Structure formats: structure tokens, C-alpha cells
Image (cartoon, grey):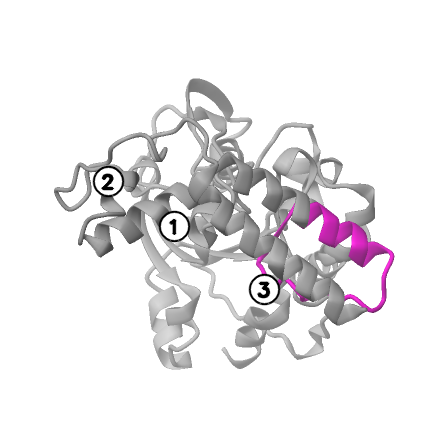
Amino acid sequence: MRYTIRIFICCTLLGVFTSGIFFVSENPYSINKKQTTFGETRNISELIFSTNRLELKEKIELTILNSEIRNSILKGIASFVWRFQENSNFFDYQFFNTEIFYGKEGEVFPKYRDCSSYNFENIEIDTVEENKFIFLLMPLKQEVERHRIHNFQRNLSVCDNQKNFDIFQNLFQNNNLIFLDIYDIFNSNNKRFYESGDTHWNDLGVKTVFSEIIEITHNKTELKLQKVGTVNENNLVLKRLGLVSKTTSQDLYKINLENNKIKKILIIHDSFFEEIYVSNKFLSQYYDPVLLHWSKFENMSKYDVNNLLKEYEFIIFESSIDTFFESRILFLENK
């Protein structure tokens, strides 16, 4: 039975990808519209009878990628797989080994790898009086936007990371170790803090969190956000995976801060601080920032780490919360 289902779904997927060649929506990559790539202006039907195979291959790929039929069928398959997994023990959970799943209205959410707890007995965090460590552990999207996923998906997609965070905070918080409770910040209202077609924060999420950080680093209180415009969301996760195209908009905000003093700050980060989410132009309004990815920070010696941290008054440790308790917290055991 298992293999029959797999064969059926694989055949369906093959049909989805090939159907995009013949059934496409009205978009710039339609089979009836001409493209300009590598200097080529002929359409697909003309290229079929030409010798320009590279151009034909690229146009067919673009046509499939932008097919509305393909998009809608992929959404249906994703929903089917999740519903099937809910009521079945013989369908492999990782049959589609993708990074995401779809919630309500095509919302994109990250899949969990493991749900694990952590023993905090081996952790020691040393600071000096001049340093302040700010821990910014980002919840997974479905942890703060549970209303945007289906009921049957919740047991498969949500771990109790908040419990690990609460223990971590209660054990170590002091004048030099500051923990931003993003669960509390994001759950305090019903606004959208993550992009619709992405697993990372949107502009409101970024500015809301940084208004909290600036209150700490600049000794301010009750900073207000002001809406300044609207742009399309990045939806970068979908673009990277080459799956369903999605166009959604987000509001842009600015933080109202007068008499701003630039602070020197080190940010140890993961993908939440990629330029497309948090621009250097924005950071430079308030900080002289140095960004260091976890992959480089974890390879530094204890001696180099200690010397580096002494150079900054504030150090932000940002990480997706699941990855932090899965692996990155182990770094603190050794440093």
C-alpha cells in the first residue's frame, strides 16, 4: 500500500511539473509571449524548431515555475500529505523532505526536525561588567501564529520551545544577561510578525523587536512605531525552494527616536539578520554594527571570543530558538 501511494504521488508531481508547459496563466512567462534572455526574443513555439536548445530549456523552466495550475496543485498535494499523515502510521513523515509546510491560505511554516529538551546544568555564561549580553531567540512562526495553521497540523509542527526558554531565562537572567521574551512581545497582539511566504520576520517584526532592543541599549522607554509605506514581502523561502510563487504585501515602519546616539554593537546571528530582512542601512541609524554569523563564531577559540567580546558594550546573541537549544547552546558550555 505504501509503495502504491508513493508511486501515485510521484506520478502526480510529474504531471504537475510537465503540465506547466501547456497550461499557464497570463504572466510574463506565458507560452504565447516573447521573452528576452541571452539576446533571444523568440517564443517557445518558435524555439521548438530552432537549434537554440539552451534558450528553449530556460523558457520551458520559467514557464513551469510560473504556472498557476502547478502552484494550485502543489498546494493541494501539501494539504493532502499533512491530512494523510494525521491519520496514518504507514506513510513516512519525511516522504516529502522539504523545509516547510502550508498552513491556512497558503501560509508557509517551517518543519521541526526534533523536539528536544536541554539539561542546563553544564552551562556557564561569564560576562564582565562592561558587557551586556542580549539573548534574542526567535520562535518558529507557528509558535506565535498558531491561528494560521490547521488544527490537525499542530501536533506535528509545534514543540514546547517556550518551556526551554523560560528555564534558560530564569536560571541566568541578571544585570548583564538580558533575555527578550519574543513570545510575550509577539503574542501581546494579533498582528502579523512573519512574512506570509517565508519563515522569517517581516518589517513589523523587525521594528517591534528593535524598539525593545533600543530601549535597552539607549536607555529609552515606550518607543513608538510609525507606518511609512507598503512594499511586497520577500517570500524568500519559497523563492529559494523553487516552489509555489506568492505575492503578498507588508507595511513598512520606522522607530521614532530623537537625540539618537550611535552605539557600538556586536550581533551574532543566523538567517534572521540577512540583509534582505534587516538592512545595514536600518541598523546604522542606531548602531555601529558588526555582524558575525554563528558558523564563524562557533569556530573561534575561547581566547579569541573573549578578546572579541571585550570590544563591545552590547552583544546580541540571535538565533532561531529550535536551533539554539538543539546545537548552539552547546557552544556556551565550552566558552
Report the residue at 48% width, 26% height from top: 249
**Left or right: 99 with respect to 266?**
right
The residue carrying pointer 3 sits among few (fewer than 14), some (14 to 19) or many (20 or more) residues within 10 Å by Cα, namely some
Residues 190 and 82: in front is: 82
For residue 81: magenta?
yes
Circle 2 — which element?
helix
Q: Which residue is mark 3?
A: 323
Q: Tell me the amino acid under the disc marked 3.
A: Thr
**Left or right: 159 with respect to 71?**
right
Report the residue at 23% width, 55% height from top: 53
Image x and y of residue 9, in percent: 66, 58
Looking at the image, which residue sits at the far front? 49
Circle 1 — which element?
loop
The numbered mark, 2 or 1, whose residue comes first in the sequence reads 2
Q: Which mark is residue 46?
A: 2
Q: Which residue is mark 1?
A: 274
- In the image, which residues are magenta? 78-102
Q: CA distance from mark 3 to mark 2?
A: 50 Å
Image x and y of residue 184, in percent: 69, 40
Residues 47 and 233: in front is: 47
